[in-house]
Amino acid sequence: MNLAKTLTFCQPPGRNYVLPNGKIAAAFFDFDGTIAECEPDFVRAKKMFWRFLRHLGFSKHEAAEMFAKIEHENMSLKGFEVHMLGEAMAQTYRALCKHHGKRVNSDDELICREIGRHPYWRKPREFKDALPVLNRTQHNFLMVLVTIGNREAQKYKAKMLGLQFDEMIITSESNKRLLVANAIKDCNIDPRYSFMKGNSARSDGDVGHVTNVIYNPLETGLKFDEAELPKNTGFEVFLVKSWREAEEQGIMRLVRRRRYLLGDQHTYAESAEDGMSQDMFNPMQ
Ligand SMILES: [Mg+2]
């Protein structure tokens, strides 16, 4: 029996992510700064923290310097776990107390931790058009969430937005390229017709070594997130400014290309950007 036909029968009704060569087309999505806003909550938490420290009699300037150093050291040593912001705030508070010969108050230390915990457990706000585009994308792709952070916190946020993914890759380290490469192997994914959409040139862009990348820098807050996007990897980088553009200039083009795939022999229809026929991709199919 034809393998492609067999696998097609395995798709859930209404989904169309098995390619003519029997492999799977997958859409990998980052969450923070890509699907949902992230930066404003961290900016707010830091403002609250400075305010609280000023209330305790410490200078914001001194606290900010100490905090930046502690946060940077922690991140490089322990990764991006959910408690790390609160921990860095508590450490900063303790360091300030020590520096000024003040006694550490356990309630104040707890408040610091709580301020740092808040951004992870709030209701997420999705970026414009993210949900309808995700909804349409799931018809044509296996949906995979690839996010750095704490498993419970990330699952909670996805659930709060009503999102469902076929696979979730949640890591506390910055190793998306390796984890996506593993998923490509494990799920029989064809990386030529798949993509990673993200806002970080460093961690999401790096996935461009193993599949296509839709780079959509909706948030570019962290300095260390800046990096060169990969070149000459055999895959494509689609640079877009919004979810709508991501759909029109990345996702739809990859869907179009699969129509020219026959068995393992693929030919890319290098069509002009403009004049793209809308009926090549029916998002409702
Ligand atoms: Mg991100």
Image (cartoon, rainbow, N blue to C red):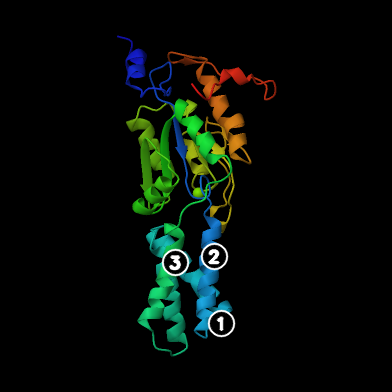
User: Which of the 4 quarters of the picture holds residue 102?
Assistant: bottom left
Tell which circle, 1 or 3, labels the residue nearer the N-terminal end: 1
Instruction: Describe residue 102's horizontal placement relative to residue 239 as left or right.
Output: left
Task: Looking at the picture, tell me which residue is in the foreground, 206 or 54.
Answer: 54
Report the amino acid beneath label 3: Gly
Report the amino acid beneath label 2: Arg
Give the position of the N terminus as an image quadrant: top left
Tell which circle, 3 or 2, labels the residue nearer the N-terminal end: 2
Above or below, comparing residue 63 to residue 215 in the picture: below
Mark 3 Cα-neighbour bin, 10 Å: few <14, some 14–19, many ≥20: many
Residue that carries the numbered disc 3 in the rendered image: 116
Q: Residue at image x 56%, y 82%?
A: 59
**Does the beta carbon at disc 3 come under 8 Å from ligand 1?**
no
Task: Looking at the picture, tell me which residue is in the foreground, 5 or 181.
Answer: 5
Q: Position of residue 252 (x, y in %)?
A: 56, 26
Q: Position of residue 138 (x, y in %)?
A: 45, 30
Q: Residue at image x 57%, y 42%?
A: 229
Task: Looking at the picture, tell me which residue is in the foreground, 266 or 58.
Answer: 58
**Residue farthest to the right?**
274
Q: Position of residue 58 (x, y in %)?
A: 52, 83
Q: Residue at image x 54%, y 81%?
A: 54
Front of the two marks 1 and 2 = 2
Residue that carries the numbered disc 2 in the rendered image: 44
Q: Secondary structure at mark 1?
A: loop
- Disc 3/disc 2 C-alpha distance (Å): 10 Å
Instruction: Describe residue 76's horizontal placement relative to residue 236 as left or right.
Output: left
Front of the two marks 1 and 3 = 3
Residue that carries the numbered disc 1 in the rendered image: 59
Mark 2 Cα-neighbour bin, 10 Å: few <14, some 14–19, many ≥20: few
**Does the beta carbon at disc 1 come under 8 Å from ligand 1?**
no
Mark 1 Cα-neighbour bin, 10 Å: few <14, some 14–19, many ≥20: some
